[in-house]
Image (cartoon, helix red, strand yellow):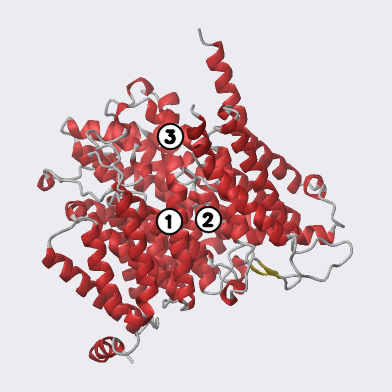
Amino acid sequence: MAGGARFSRTLPYVVPGVAAGYLYYVASNFQFNERPGTLGPDFWPEAILALMIVTCLFKIVAELAARNDAAEIGGVLEEIIEESAGEHSAGSPPGAPLVESHPYLLIAGMALTAGYVMFIQSLGFFIATVLYLALFIVLGGYRRWGVVAAVSVAGTLLLLFFFMKVVYVSLPIGQVPFAAVTLFLMQVMGIR
Amino acid sequence: MEGTLHNLLIGFGHVFEPLNLLVLLVGIILGLLVAVLPGLTLVMGVVLALPFTYGMHVIPAIILLTAMYVSGTYAGAWTSILFRVPGEPMDVPLLWDGYTMARRGEAANALGWTLMSALGGGLVAAVVMVLLAQPIAKIALTFSTPEYFAILFFGLASVVSLGGATLVNALISLFAGLLIATVGVDDTYGTHRFTFNVPLLSDGIDYLVVMVGAYGLGEVFLRLEQGFKSAPLQAIDQIKTRLPRLREMLAFKGTFLRGTLTGIIVGLVPGAGATVASFLSYGIESQYGKRRQQMGSGIPEGIIAPQTAATSSVGGAIIPLVTLGIPGSGATAIILGAFLLHGLQPGPQVFATSSNIVYAMFASVFVGIIVMCVIGYFAIKVLVRVLDFPEVIVSAYVVMMCILGAFAARHNVIDVWLMVIFGILGYLFERFKFPITPLVLGVILGPLAESSFMTTMISHDNDWTIFFTRPVSGPLMVVAIITLVYPVLRHLRHKSKIRKAP
């Protein structure tokens, strides 16, 4: 295996390993009044972090030394499934397409979701949710505009009614001028 | 025994109250729909139903989630058999014989065997659940903190040992979960741990936020990356179920029994759920069944074995949840969440404090299985049409439910941010083959494990050998260590086999 590829395979273990190292440092600086003969509140997290660091290091060393065999010990479940599936050709649906990858869709979906959370307080639940649902459905490749509009608006109204009227969850109303829309809908639905 | 029957009857009384019965019906239908849709997993479905229970009383809330859990183990078989589209991973073994039967024109028979397997396996497991729960709880009442820690250690060890592409990844996932559980103010010293001056973090990270994000949002992100698809349906009008005759069923009593036993035992083990039960049972039938040579060629045993095990694992998994407060699977972890949301802590005391709720849950398993089979028999044609529904629309609403679920827990947008972060983490975990179940069970069981460990240390002068010297905790710790080491031994044996092969 090329050095670059090997290094990139270690990344999923370097990141948690480094994070664990930093958190270990944080844990070792917890402020508390020590009681003689008693384990402090830092003991448990430090123990977990130490185990995590050791596990990550083991995997990184195994990858870099190209002795990945030892680090590839599978979970029993995975092996049971692999063994069973291996004996049958129909393990996956026939003609099933190879797994595609659309990283831009993923990034756009994550950004859209983060944007929704960011703007829900100012736009209010109704406007933010209608926009989010419509954009998400379009982003996912669905192009029947009438259905998109109906599903987004009707679904949001239903959610608004259920959560505010039935289970009494106080959803964000939004800020002026958007709050007027939510308040109007609440009035129509008899939500106080 | 008489007391148990009496309590169970009271439980049935609760379930047959009109509102609770309606909730059960809704739960069964939702569970069936979730199981049919390949984009939604059983655990995800139960997670998404959780926000709807916030405003409910505890009994209907538990009935709703239990009903979804029960029926979620059944309907995925339909699409496996009819369209070769497994609704859930647990339904993959049903492709091998079920779909082969359908291709031979015996789809109605295959669906009949599935229904009777779910019914038989589920009901027998429910009886075992009722009979075992109270005695186990009585034994658990005698446990002290070292025993509790040993049980938790065994639970976490088995989660790591069973789950995940690699042991290392499962361990990292578990440690991450245990660490997340330490965020907040420490109970003993009042120390702020990993709160980074964020006031909301002082209360800790709600494990529901972790579960909703990692299981729900993470899965949607993964599907978004792969591109949403809907399965084209064919010949839906010809779908019907032909129930096997009693004589036919008696011919397969051994398979029914093996499948049910496997399901119950696997359900009892933390970390192993319906999927393990289904695959393991198929494997056992392939090795020990009368017609093992013909497995995979479209014989009823290939349907009975996985389906009885999958449905009977529900009864098994509810036992540790109720008696020890330890969820054995993702779905039972969410049901535990519903208990906690309503101020109830499952565990050995639960039979003394809230036996009506526990027995209502037990009764809902019985009624749920029967209702599920009745609906399955009559409404299969209608329910499988949901496959025609665009996956992207379902996913958009899954995200909405995740967001609302996280928000409704504490009415705080920071929880929604945390949920999104855990959604991204869940996606990364899936992408890099880190299993999510150890993460979630680590978050849930972490506080219990820490408090039982720390209390034991305080009570026994920091002598850690106490875990190994007590009559109950000692063997449990040894079994837990063996469980943890087992994948390594399995790997070494496999390697030596390869080396010896010519």
Which of the chains bears the disc numbered 3?
A
Residue B213 appears left or right of B170: left
Marks 2 and 1 close (CB-CB < 8 Å) = yes
Q: Examine the rendering and report whether any part of residue B187 can be seen.
A: yes
Q: Which numbered dot is residue B440?
A: 2
Q: Could one spot residue B8 in this view of the protein?
A: no
Instruction: Inspect the image, locate mark 2, and give the three-letter code of the amino acid beneath it.
Output: Val
The residue under the point 11% across, 67% down is A146
- Pointer 1 residue: B215
How far apart are labels 3 and 1 at the CA level? 21 Å
Q: Secondary structure at mark 2?
A: helix
Asked if the residue at tag 2 contacts the one at tag 3, i.e. Cβ–Cβ closer than 8 Å, the answer is: no
Estimate the x, y position of residue A91 in percent, counting from the top left: 33, 32
Residue B452 on image: x %, y %: 72, 59
Label 2 in the same subunit as label 1: yes
In front of the other: A103 or B301:
A103
Residue A32, x across and y down, in percent: 78, 70
Outermost residue to the top: B502
Determine the CA span between mark 3 and mark 2: 22 Å
Q: Secondary structure at mark 1?
A: helix
Report which residue position mark 3 lands on.
Answer: A81
CB contact under 8 Å: marks 3 and 1:
no
- In the displayed structure image, the side of residue B495 where residue A138 appears, left or right: left
Are dots 3 and 2 on a single chain?
Answer: no
Which quadrant would residue B215 be assigned to in this image?
Answer: bottom left
| Mark in front: 3 vs 2 | 2
**Is A15 situated left or right of B104 in this image?**
right
Dot 2 or dot 1, earlier in sequence:
1
